[in-house]
Amino acid sequence: MMETTSGNPAPPEYTPAGAAVSVMVSPDGMRADVCLTPPEEGGSLVTETMIWEALAAKKVVYGVDEGRVGQLAREPVYHMDIQIAAGEPAVHGESAVIKILIRTEKDIRPKELDDGSVDYKDLGVIQVVRKDDLLCEKTPATTGESGMNVFGAVMPAKPGKDIPMPAGKNTVASEDKLQLLAACDGHADIVNRKIQVMNTFTVHGSVSNSTGNINFVGNVVVEGNVLTGFAVQATGNVTINGTVEGAVVEAGGNIIIKEGVNGFSKGLVKAGGYIKSKYIQSGIVQAGGDIEASFIFHSKVQSGGSVFLIGSRGTVVGGHVTALKSVTTLLAGGRSSYVPTTLEAGNDPATLARSREIPKEIEKNARESGALLRNIQLLNEHKKAGRITPDRLETLQRSVSAYQMMAQRAAELEEELEVIQEAIAASESGTVNISGTAFPGVAIVIGAERMVLETKYDRCTFIRGESGVSMSPLR
């Protein structure tokens, strides 16, 4: 140590601070920035080694811009966050896409004539396909590509969601499972979200003593009438060029009645899809989808979709009309006399009943599959220990197969429940729409609320509000 002339030690020699490097990493680990602090006068300058060491200290190893490291060492920029590394984001997979190549529109509207009447004789509802015709194509889901953050950790990609082919009756998938083809000549349609090709049976005349009852796996076309006491039942669609007179007509698909229904307070017209009829008089009509008619007199009509009274007559008089979504009519009730008429929207008893049954089925399935799983686990322990007999090995294999089927059934029940719950949620927004006049004596029911009209209402919509059924002007 040096001493001054007075004998005291000299102060230590001052060393100016050199440049500093700090590294900041984004919370998601996909970006790293550096910030340079300048040296004091005479202090050491920033170097590439300093930058690399700072990155290493933060464990940044991927996506570093080496050119920028060198540039910052040669031409430093101070007190500024500068991106120095970037991760590679994962590219998530694309979900599968089904392109339907057949006509899917269910709203086959009949032509409305100049006088406001409706022509039900020109509908064009049959869509003919030939064997091996292409029905739909599938673009498969992709798995995506994984990414990596600046720490060198893999960022997994989410695979796209697969969609099963909407394969229904009389369809066949191509070898690569990307095309759905018709397995026979027939009528192509979509029922319950599946494409099906159905053969068609034609009655050249009326359903009467000369034909007996008709029960057919496919579509049915009746060129005449369906007379009282007879029945037409089909798994597909039914088209009747005449009238239904106190008969039973049931279809798994849709029903078109070009003239109308004279129910005589007996018989039944029931469809899994929509029903279109020129009129409904003293009949019982039920549809899983929409119902269309020019007028409804003293009938019990139930729709899992909406009920539309169309054309210049568009009238409901007497009876009870129920729709899950909406009822739309020009006129409702008796114009000159008090005729009890009920228009109900937002309720579907069958759907509500099924929504109560499914949780019980799910619970039962869970109990049985749980017991089966415990048995499988026990048999597997015997198998691992080498103590399983051939009979028990066969039992194990059957149990595994049964368990897999029960798991599949559980998934199907969950999906069915989800669909039904969506339908129940939609029922809360049921509406009754009057484009003309609703006369006194008409009862409006929305959900659990009921309102009986004591005066006439013009051009209005009835909905369920907080205090019951309320009315607003028709938009």
Image: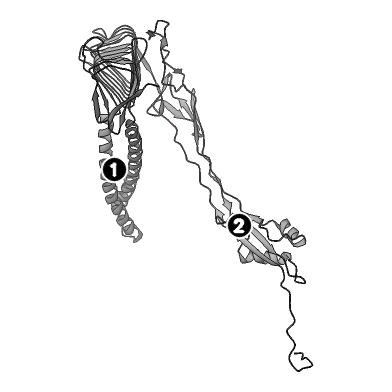
Numbered range of the magenta stretch: 159-165
Please tell me which residue lies in front, 357 or 433. 433
Q: Quadrant of residue 108?
A: top left
Distance between mark 1 and mark 2 Cα atoms: 46 Å
Q: Main secondary structure of the magenta part?
A: loop
Q: Is residue 285 left or right of residue 19?
A: left
Place of residue 457 in the rendered image (x, y in percent of width and height, measured from the top left):
30, 18
The residue tagged 1 is: 362
Res. 150 mark: 2
Q: Badge 1: few (under 14), some or many (20 or more) residues near its Cα, within 10 Å?
A: some
**Residue at the extreme right:** 5
Q: Is residue 460 left or right of residue 342?
A: right
Place of residue 31 in the rendered image (x, y in percent of width and height, measured from the top left):
61, 55
Place of residue 248 in the rendered image (x, y in percent of width and height, measured from the top left):
25, 16
Q: Is residue 363 covered in magenta?
A: no
Look at discs 1 and 2 and give the one toward the viewer: 2
Amino acid marked by disc 2: Val
Residue 157 visible in image: yes
**Residue at the extreme front:** 6
- In the depicted structure, whether residue 49 falls above or below residue 395: below
Q: Quadrant of residue 184?
A: top left
Q: Badge 2: few (under 14), some or many (20 or more) residues near its Cα, within 10 Å?
A: many
* Viewport quadrant of the C terminus: top left
Q: Residue at x 22, y 17 (%)?
A: 441
Please tell me which residue lies in front, 85 or 2. 2
Amino acid marked by disc 1: Ile
